[in-house]
Image (cartoon, rainbow, N blue to C red):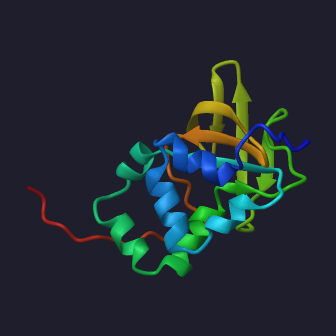
Amino acid sequence: MPVDEDLMPVDEILVQDGNFSTFVQALGASRLEGLLAGQGPYTVFAPTDEAFDRLQPGTLDELMMDPKGNLAEILLYHVVPPGEDPVSGGGTIVTVQGSPIIVDTTGEGMTVNGARVIQADIPAANGVIYAIDTVLIPPDITLPVINETDG
């Protein structure tokens, strides 16, 4: 993918878009914000703020307490490294985190590990962004269980 001088890099598009503020905040907390400023080309399956809102209450706060642990692993699981083309026909692709994701393309749209792509092909100078409706969790990560009483 050639670099398009007229476009911003992935990290700047995520900041300016406004629908990915939680993802951007988590990247900053994990000190991974520079990853998406690199040459690329990267494919980023970026969870929207609504996707983060769907996590069990308290989960994101718990993850933010250890930003270089499970939070960093979860964020890296949303990035496909340069040289991989996950979109042409779908299939299994290994992420920057090291675990595979399954991209499925049908006439009805695209899913990534079952998460629905709600906006595809957002171009960037160093890659492309796909907005997804669910936060992807690597298979070797167990989310913290937050004990709350039911109201």
Choose between 24 and 5: the one closer to the eye: 5
* Drawn side of residue 43 relative to residue 137, left or right: right
Number of numbered discs visible in the structure rendering: 0
As drawn, which residue projects farthest toward the top? 107
* Drawn side of residue 20 relative to residue 122, left or right: left
* Drawn side of residue 28 relative to residue 97, left or right: left
* Drawn side of residue 149 relative to residue 24, left or right: left
Whole-percent x, y for residue 97 in the image: 70, 67
Q: Who's the residue at 23% across and 71% down the image?
A: 147
Image quadrant of residue 37? bottom right
Whole-percent x, y for residue 33 in the image: 61, 65
Taking 6 as reference, is 64 above or below it?
below
Q: Who's the residue at 58% across and 39% down the image?
A: 131
Taking 137 as reference, is 63 above or below it?
below
Whole-percent x, y for residue 145 in the image: 34, 71
Residue 141 shows up from this direction: no
Residue 30 shows up from this direction: yes
Q: Who's the residue at 41% across and 52% down the image?
A: 52
